[in-house]
Amino acid sequence: MSAKLILLAGALAALASAVPRPDTPPVYGPPHPTYKQPGMPFDFSYAVRDYSGNDYAHQETSDGHVTSGSYRVVLPDGRTEIVEFSADHDNGYVANVAYEGEASYPSPSPSPSYHPAPSYHAPAPSYPPPPAHPHQ
């Protein structure tokens, strides 16, 4: 009987050690990934210039640790904004922004001269008189 008691006591001790204590938070699933893990290397670029005035481009490359590149876009005022950037885990996103060209704004168009619409006086409609009531 003492062997059963020892086995029972050992099983209870093992079970008690597996139960999380209130002073330690439970751990679920695998640990969260850190953001210091290297990324996937890549390299891409594109450019658009069409008849409607769209003119923009983007070029970017990464070795898995540092991402760098540039992009440009024509602004509504006619200047081109050029952004060169780099991003990594140590320095974050660092950008250098420059502008090419001079801002130009269209001169305001003259206000149209106001001419009131002509007014036409149509003759009042004429309706036939109502029929005489026979019981009057």
Image (spheres, grey):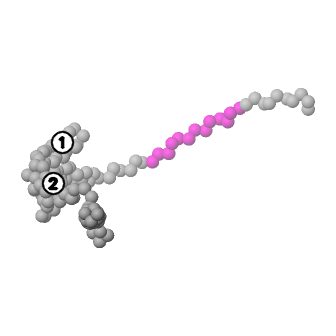
Q: Residue at x 12, y 64 (%)?
A: 90
The residue at the far bottom in this view is: 23
Q: In the picture, residue 23 is in which quadrant?
A: bottom left
Look at 21% across and 59% down and name the residue there: 31
Q: Is there a contact, CB below 8 Å, between mark 2 and mark 1?
A: no
Question: Would you say residue 119 sits in the magenta stretch?
Answer: yes
Residue that numbered label 1 is attached to: 48
Q: Determine the residue located farthest toward the right in the rendered image.
A: 136
Q: Quadrant of residue 36?
A: bottom left
Marks 2/1: CA distance?
A: 15 Å
Magenta residues (range) = 114-126
Q: Which residue sits at x=17%, y=59%?
A: 35
- The spot of residue 15 in percent (x, y) is 28, 62
Is residue 111 rendered to the left or right of residue 79? right
| Residue 44 x, y percent position in the rendering | 12, 45
Q: Which residue sits furthest front?
A: 1
Above or below, 11 against 43 in this view is below
Q: Quadrant of the C terminus?
A: top right
The crowd level at tag 2 (other Cα within 10 Å; few <14, some 14-19, many 20+) is: some
- 63 and 102: which one is in front? 63
Q: What amino acid is found at the position of numbered circle 1 in the picture?
A: Val
Secondary structure of the magenta portion, mostly? loop
Where is the N terminus found, in terms of image quarters?
Answer: bottom left
Which label was assigned to residue 82?
Answer: 2
Name the foreground residue: 63 vs 25: 25
Task: Name the residue nearer the viewer: 59 or 17.
Answer: 17
Q: Say which amino acid is labelled 2.
A: Ile
